[in-house]
Image (cartoon, grey):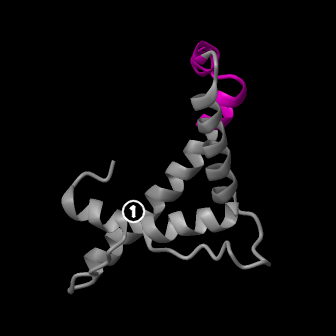
Amino acid sequence: MRRFSFDIICKFSFEIDTECFIPSFSESKLADSFDLASKISVQRAISLLPLIWKLKRLLNIGSEKKLKEGIGVVDNAVMEIIGQRRREMATTTTDLNKSDLLSRFMGSIEDDN
């Protein structure tokens, strides 16, 4: 189920096929980081004492350190996809006419950050 969710998110958001649903799919660092970030975010939401995760975030320890690292991996991958999409847009004289979420955002803003 996790592979299916990741594949759908990537397809909808970036119009890329991660092929996660293929049984022979080997784990990727991006998929693992995304999964970890999702899991820790859910744990934050159901935490009875938000002060604990906030303190861990402040001290950059435990699950909050892992969350920060996981988000970094996902962020780097997304920035790579954005760069690739910008290069495609620059080299193509016709509009790419993609309907994914990323293309819609990129069409409405100039700053990639």
Toward the bottom, the furthest residue is: 94
Name which residue lies at 75% across and 64% down: 27
Residue 102: x, y in percent? 36, 63
- The majority secondary structure of the magenta stretch comes to helix
Q: Name the residue under label 1.
A: 82
Residue 101: x, y in percent? 36, 64
Under circle 1, the secondary element is helix
Figure disc tally: 1
Question: On the picture, is 36 further left or further right than 106?
Answer: right
Q: Does the magenta stretch include residue 65?
A: yes
Q: Which amino acid does label 1 sit on?
A: Ile
Q: Does the magenta stretch include residue 79?
A: no
Residue 41: x, y in percent? 59, 37
Above or below 25: residue 5? above
Name which residue lies at 70% across and 30% down: 63
Relative depth, front residue between 20 and 85: 20
Name which residue lies at 68% across and 65% down: 3
Question: On the picture, is 3 further left or further right than 82?
Answer: right
Q: How crowded is mark 1: few (under 14 residues within 10 Å), some or many (20 or more)?
A: some
- Placement of the N terminus among the 4 image quadrants: bottom right
Name which residue lies at 28% across and 65% down: 104
Question: On the picture, is 53 further left or further right than 76?
Answer: right
Tell me which corner region of the image, top left, top right, bottom left or bottom right, holds residue 15: bottom left
Tell me which corner region of the image, top left, top right, bottom left or bottom right, holds residue 95: bottom left
Q: Give the range drawn in magenta.
A: 50-68
Residue 81: x, y in percent? 45, 65
